[in-house]
Image (tube, rainbow, N blue to C red):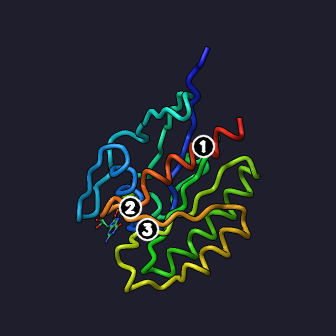
């Protein structure tokens, strides 16, 4: 039987980089110009069909705890995939990604599939972190880099489907 396989995916990154926007664009094809308020559920689910294989993603977004550095290990425990988001116009948010990756590797080892997302590529003219810097870092930590714009729906579908493929390869 072709049973469905479930994966836990967590979003991590500084406040305002676009985590909630990425999730809502993917699950509901919505975008809001305002900062999105705390959502009710702790995760959203999305069902995919990958080469005949049924996959269900449980996509965990923060409720804003990252703003108070209060996101504990319960959040990313047993995650199969992690999406680490930075905003290309904010260098600090890239440094935050680096510290999250250290934490994830320390807590989860190499089992977790890592995606580094450079979001807001529609603001390319204000870019502060070069593509090359991001690529080199991603390679170094065995992650993959995905450019996205939640605003213009660029790269979002590709991000989740590639992540799902990579997680499937691990089972
Ligand atoms: P979070 O705190 O990481 O969940 O970030 P939000 O999803 O709440 O987004 C923070 C702000 O960035 C909001 O004003 C969004 O409208 C905006 N935003 C999110 N994604 C994009 C994007 O791809 N491009 C642009 N220009 N703005 C974005
Ligand atoms: Mg959010």
Q: Are marks 2 and 3 in contact (CB under 8 Å)?
A: no
C-alpha separation, residue under disc 1 versus residue under disc 2:
19 Å
Note whether 30 is above or below 149 in the view shown. Answer: above
Whether label 2 lies within 8 Å of ligand 1 gets the answer yes
C-alpha separation, residue under disc 2 versus residue under disc 3:
9 Å
What residue do we see at 26% from left, 57% from top?
Answer: 31
Note whether 77 is above or below 82 in the view shown. Answer: above
- Measuring from the top left, give residue 40's x and y in whole percent: 32, 41
What residue do we see at 47% from left, 43% from top?
Answer: 59
Which disc, if any, is residue 165?
A: 1
Q: Secondary structure at mark 3?
A: strand
Q: Is 131 left, or right, of 139 in this rendering? A: left
Q: Are marks 3 and 1 in contact (CB under 8 Å)?
A: no
Q: Secondary structure at mark 1?
A: helix
Note whether 163 is above or below 34 in the view shown. Answer: above
- Measuring from the top left, give residue 32's x and y in whole percent: 24, 59
Between disc 2 and disc 3, whose residue precedes?
3
Which residue is denoted by mark 2 in the rendering? Answer: 154
Q: Quarter of the image for the N terminus: give it.
A: top right
Q: Is 97 left, or right, of 47 in this rendering? A: right
- Measuring from the top left, give residue 13's x and y in whole percent: 50, 64
Q: Quadrant of residue 27?
A: top left
Q: Quarter of the image for the C terminus: give it.
A: top right
Which residue is denoted by mark 3 in the rendering? Answer: 119
């Amino acid at each position: 039987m072709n049973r469905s396989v479930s994966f836990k995916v967590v979003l991590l990154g500084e406040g305002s980089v676009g985590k909630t926007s990425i999730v809502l664009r993917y699950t509901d094809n919505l975008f809001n110009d305002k900062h999105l308020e705390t959502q009710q559920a702790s995760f959203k689910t999305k069902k995919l069909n990958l080469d005949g294989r049924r996959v269900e993603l449980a996509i965990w977004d923060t409720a804003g705890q990252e703003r108070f550095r209060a996101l504990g290990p319960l959040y990313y425990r047993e995650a199969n995939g992690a999406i680490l988001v930075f905003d290309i116009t904010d260098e600090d948010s890239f440094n935050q990604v680096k510290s999250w990756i250290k934490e994830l590797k320390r807590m989860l080892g190499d089992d977790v599939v890592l995606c580094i997302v450079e979001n807001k590529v529609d603001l390319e003219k204000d870019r502060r972190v070069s593509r090359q810097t991001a690529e080199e870092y991603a390679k170094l930590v065995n992650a993959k880099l995905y450019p996205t714009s939640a605003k213009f729906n660029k790269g979002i579908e590709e991000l989740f489907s590639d992540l799902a493929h990579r997680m499937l390869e691990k089972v």
